[in-house]
Image (cartoon, rainbow, N blue to C red):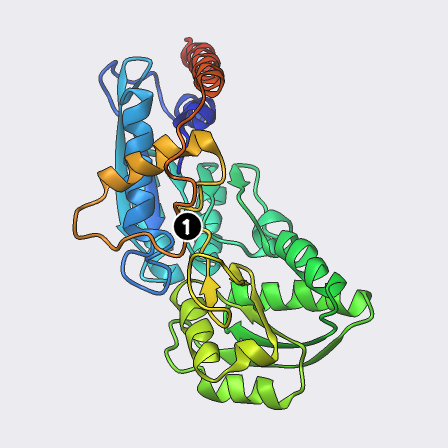
Amino acid sequence: MIRLTALAAFCLAGVAAHAQPPASDAPIKLGAILDMGGVYADVTGSGSETAARMAIEDFGGKLLGRPIQFLVADHQNKPDIAAAVATRWYDQEGVTAIMDVASSSPALAVMNVADKRHRIVMLSGPGALAITNRNCIATAVHYTYNTYANAQTVGRAILQQGGKRWFFITADYTFGHALENDTAAVVKAAGGQVLGDAKAPLDNTDFSTMLLTAQQSGADVIGLANGGNDLVNTVKQASEFGLTRQAEIRGARVEHQRHPRHGSADRAEPRSAGRLLLGHRRRDARMVRAVLRSFAQDAEPVTGGALLGHDALPSRRDRRRHDRRRARDAEDARYAGERLLRP
């Protein structure tokens, strides 16, 4: 979810730097370039759009008296489309900041457009390490995760559990390559082995040949360097072939688990970063219910134990702490905005 209280001052910096003092009723425009119907639609797509609109509504819909306008575009997982949208938004439509930009290749294309114009781009969907280091720009923020962080946490944890021999099934584009390379470096540094890999095109449906190759390699761990529907399809097919009983199936956003209330012992349950895995804290319960109410009635239900603990209510202490934090954030945003827009 895009948190407007945290972003307000940063976005207003773009308004002050790139425009004359606007009319008091001119909207502050924010945009999200998402995958609305492709491989990442379930983990970004309409869910990210809904979350952003909820954040704007929660913030009051205005900043310093100016309405906040939110735009959405579908990049179709094509960098040229993402770059064209970013160019039009920045140059013609007066968009202050572009956000999310699901998928690493489109994100890098948008960063190039933003860099040439010294405009703001805030990235939460893509994960390639190049966004954080080699291709980093002064007006971009990359948060949530990247491939280095996943490799250093998930990879190390699996190695500590005895997974030494790896085979990768990798999405054949920027993110997949980066995740495989970063994880392979961790494996080798810890004395493990990478026995091979198989590259799959983005939005692939048949992973059977790759899974059989992985099985024949003798690997302890099949590392899935992919995401979205590719990740879901890989795990489903691995379970059908019985690989979840023979080897650990691990990925950036997947866990092989035995849950006492959901599924059998052999069920590999993918958990996407965009799912509502919020029920582990009592104060998240209201947010979960609010998000579910905001989605259309025919939307795909949240499954896989995502609402564990959903009956718990936030404590009075948690509510007070939350209210104080929101008040501080709002005051900080107002103060920063007034200074940045001061003639």
Which x, y percent locates residue 288? 35, 38
Q: Nearer the viewer, residue 308 or 213?
A: 308
Q: Quadrant of the C terminus?
A: top left
Q: Residue 156: percent from the left, percent from the top? A: 72, 59
Amino acid type, mark 1: Gly
Q: Position of residue 295 (x, y in %)?
A: 23, 43
| Residue 189 spot, x, y in % from top left | 81, 65
**Where, by quadrant of the figure, is residue 252 drawn?**
bottom right
Residue 236 appears in the picture as rendered: yes
Q: Nearer the viewer, residue 265 or 81?
A: 265
Which residue is the site of mark 1? 274
276 to 320, vertically: above or below: below
Note whether 147 is above or below 329 in the view shown. below
Give the crowd class for mark 1: few <14, some 14-19, many >=20 residues within 10 Å. some
> Residue at coordinates 48% horizontally, 48% vertically from top-left?
111
SS type, badge 1? loop
Residue 4 in which image quadrant: top left
Left-right relation of 300 to 135: left
Q: Residue at x 22, y 52 (%)?
A: 299
Q: Is residue 23 left or right of residue 137?
A: left
Q: How many numbered marks, from 0 up? A: 1
- Most extreme residue toward the front, as rendered? 260
- Give the left or right position of residue 229, taking residue 254 as reference: left
Please state, as top left, top right, bottom left or bottom right, where the N terminus lies in the image. top left
Q: Which residue is located at x 35 percent, y 19 percent?
A: 20
Q: Is residue 91 visible?
A: no
340 up-or-down from 18: above or below: above
**Vertical comparison of 33 with 242: above or below:** above
